[in-house]
Image (spheres, grey):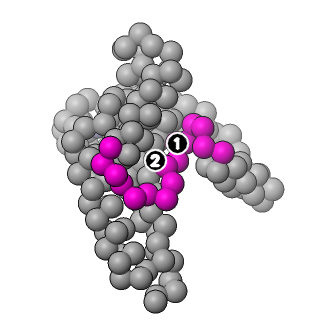
Amino acid sequence: MNSTKTYITTSIPYVNAAPHVGFALELVQADAYARHSRLLGKDIRFQCGTDDKSLKNVRAAEAAGRPVADFVGENADRFEQLGRHLQISNDAFVRTSTDTRHITCVHSLWNACARNGDLYRKNYEGFYCVGCEQFYELTDLDDGRCPEHGIPLETVREEN
Ligand SMILES: [Zn+2]
């Protein structure tokens, strides 16, 4: 028996829509790996979940004319149900908006940063792709467009 603990996780998808077949494939692949690892006697933790906090989710809810929390909650439920329908053997399903384990960890990390004086406020402005949910440098762009989505980027200003 291998005493090393192995952590297996899927990506944590944004819940701006119902899950698609690509995520079902990811769940099945991760599950096959987890089950195989268990059969080999490995000590694993297999975790799935959803990223409920994103601009993409907010915009999808607004486009649907729905309250964000309701829209996100319903789609997150669909992702969790997909795992159950596929009989995925995950040990945990963590939603970033409601799971107390996640919230406790985030608060702990935040407070540790605050205690060490690592938090400060500063304005930031950059080129943002909502599809990617990330900022890009000018040198990353493909003719001024997102290299992944091929769409023009938004200039986003925010205080962090
Ligand atoms: Zn993009």
Quadrant of the rendered image containing residue 128? top left
Seen at 64% across and 51% down, the residue is 101
Q: Nearer the viewer, residue 74 or 155?
A: 74
Q: Residues within 10 Å of mark 1 (few under 14, many from 20)?
A: many
- Is the stretch drawn in magenta largely helix, strand or loop? loop
Which region shows up in magenta? 85-100
Q: Amino acid at mark 1?
A: Arg
- Does any portion of residue 152 appear in the rendered image? yes
Q: Which residue is mark 1?
A: 95
Answer with left or right where residue 86 lies relative to residue 75: left
Q: Would you place residue 135 above or below residue 91 in this image?
A: above
Marks 2/1 in contact by CB < 8 Å: the verdict is: yes
Label 1 sits on a secondary structure element that is strand
Q: Amino acid at mark 2?
A: Gly
Residue 155, x across and y down, in percent: 40, 29
Answer with left or right where residue 74 lies relative to residue 124: left
Farthest residue toward the bottom? 1
Q: Would you place residue 157 above or below residue 44 in this image?
A: above
Residue 141, x across and y down, in percent: 26, 43
Residue 118, x across and y down, in percent: 71, 55
Q: Nearer the viewer, residue 62 or 2?
A: 2
Q: Which residue is mark 2?
A: 49
Q: Residues within 10 Å of mark 2 (few under 14, many from 20)?
A: many
Label 2 sits on a secondary structure element that is strand
Seen at 70% across and 49% down, the residue is 104
Seen at 51% across and 35% down, the residue is 53
Disc 2 or 1, which lies upstream in sequence? 2
Farthest residue toward the top? 65
